[in-house]
Amino acid sequence: MATAVASGGEGWHAGERAIHQTLLGARERPRDNPTYRGLTPSYGYRVQSSPLVTFGTLDRDGRPWTTVWGGEAGFCRPVAQGVLGIRGAAVDARFDPVLDALFGGGTGQGGIQDGEVVRPEGGRVMSGLSIDLETRDRVKLAGRMVAGAVSLTAQDGALADLQMAFQVTESLGNCPKYLNKKRIVPQIPRPHLASQGRLGLPLSGEAIELVHKADLFFISSKHSAADNGSEAESMDTNHRGGPAGLVRVFRNDASEGVTLVYPEYSGNRLYQTLGNLQTDPSVGLAIPDFETGDVLYLTGRASILIGDKAAAYLPCTKLAVRIDVQEARFVKDGLPFRGSAIDYSPYNPPVRHLATEKPPPEATANESGLGTARLVAREEITPTISRYVFRLSLASPSSTATSPRSASLWHAGQHVTLDFGPELDHGWSHMRDDDPQSLNDNFVRTFTVSSHPPPPPPPPPSSDPVEFEITARRHGPATALLAKWNLRVPLELPVLGFGGEEAFRLPVLAQAAENDGAATPSQRTTSIFASGVLSSSSHHGDDAMRPLKLLWSLRREDLALAVKVLEKDPALAKDGTTTLFVTGSVRSDSGGLAKDEKIVRLEEMGVVVKMMRMGRDDVLGAAADGKSGQNKRRFFCCTGPELMKGLLQWTKGEDVVFESFQY
């Protein structure tokens, strides 16, 4: 993370500016650094809610190392203004390089003193990343360890109870685009150092297997405010996620060394890690195995590979990082938690194998996904929103990991993930100066399905294909392609799958509420908040869910969408069930506000139309009706990040269900 971040200023250091200029160009590089000086209450709450926090610091030779602590939410929490208190039970006291650097002198010789309070003069530079893999929520942190102590709890000194104060000087919400969801539970580790030799190199077969199995790793880098390689003033710890095998072992030789390579996928375009590596190539990685608790700690030197240099290692890749490992520690059962898979990111591209590797046969087969979708119809609803109809041709059962034929392909309100890469990916050789955002873009896009699913079971591939619809706003290259495509020419896109939050479905939640002994659905006020595109398929017409309140924020030019949705499901419009907040207005020839015929139609249907932005009183008042209190009302939020931020603040302490779309 950059240092000296000031509100309203650019706040980028020289390495970040160089990366922005190289990858984005002067016109596209971000003007302001969104990193916050200090720790906001909202970030503090998110850290406290996360079961894992990964930390980075420097050993006595100035080399970065990274670790992961936790297992249960609340082990890291705010204890004072801008200060996080960390209390970690069952931390590996013998082989964890970060614990050793903070409390053992960074010698790797197990110099931790039981119960000794450590107060480094001026604090010890470190960084962190809180991460909740069930919600994909994550917050980057940077600052200094100001005090701490370690109590050895195992007879052999293998485990420690850690208490530490971390002064946060910088914080930033991070991109969850390639995170696979996992359920985290605590576990008492029994750490055993499995790497051989003083430096742990070359890597053992088990360590290489862990690397090629990993779908997530953590990386720490450092930055000197003087940009001259002097003592680090700030660090950055971040995550890299994707498909299992995103990191490749390029070389593992006792004489020539150990080299890893991974692709940099498209993200938030801040390039803070790369900016640090631009001026100081020192890097530290922690690669965890969530199933076994094994972990590979690495420290080394990184090289940023762009264009043909990246493709020389990973074909069809425009941006990659090469890491020459200087030291490794492969620790069996070294992590105080376990993780089980829940869901996979819809944005994960296929594994990018090395040019020297021959991909396994199943890798090619699995890239085909569920089948293909052919665009067969398009309806322009508003100037920017259109409805698209696709005909789905399912792949054969042998080419899909899980056959979908035993149940519906999707439920109302779930999403479909389409791969636009065959149409939009121009390859690594063209850096697309006209579209810098496309750098390493895999062109995988996800849309909410706006049509009801077919009755199960779906037809086999030899029968008539299934059709599904999406309703989407034109924004970016994928939707621009759909909007302008000549329908007389076939457009077939790979379908990677259907999915979405089961817990977000209203009937499921209603039943769960009854099973938990909460108020019955008919006694509850259920409020749904949405902005932009909304499909009636999200509503099930179940009278048991009444009383239902829908608050919908929409641009004035998109009113035709509201008319179309509510005419299709008039139950949502009657008796003031829906309140529509319309932003933007048009004046009549006489100078007054013109009343759109669409507004008249909506009001005739029973919709309450307000020409204003949605506010706190609107939100809390929607579900009031004398039903405030625990188990009396529930809020469903489906909107973009800005309105979502306000909604979550206004409904703090309420029963809130939401899905995050901040990819």
Image: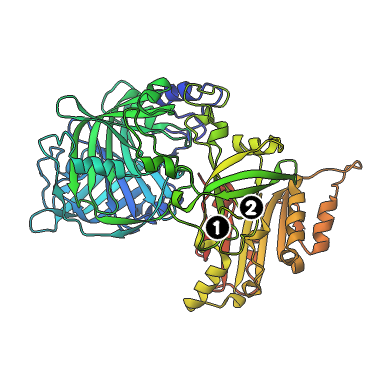
Left or right: 163 in relation to 429: left
> Could you tell whether 81 is left or right of 467 in the image?
left
Q: Residue at x 19, y 41 (%)?
A: 205
Q: Disc number at residue 468? A: 2
Residue at x 76% of width, y 57% of height: 609
Task: State the separation of the CA atoms marked 2 and 1.
Answer: 10 Å
- State the residue in front, 429 or 662: 429
Name the image quarter holding residue 178: top left
Give the amino acid at mark 2: Phe
Residue identifier under label 1? 409
Residue 608 in view (yes/no): no
> What type is the residue that disc 1 sits on?
Leu
Which is nearer the N-term, disc 2 or disc 1?
1
Which residue does the image show at 24% across and 59% down from the upper left? Answer: 187
The residue furthest right is 590
SS at badge 1: loop
Instruction: Determine the image quadrant of residue 176.
Output: top left
Instruction: Say if mark 2 contacts mark 1, CB within 8 Å.
Output: yes
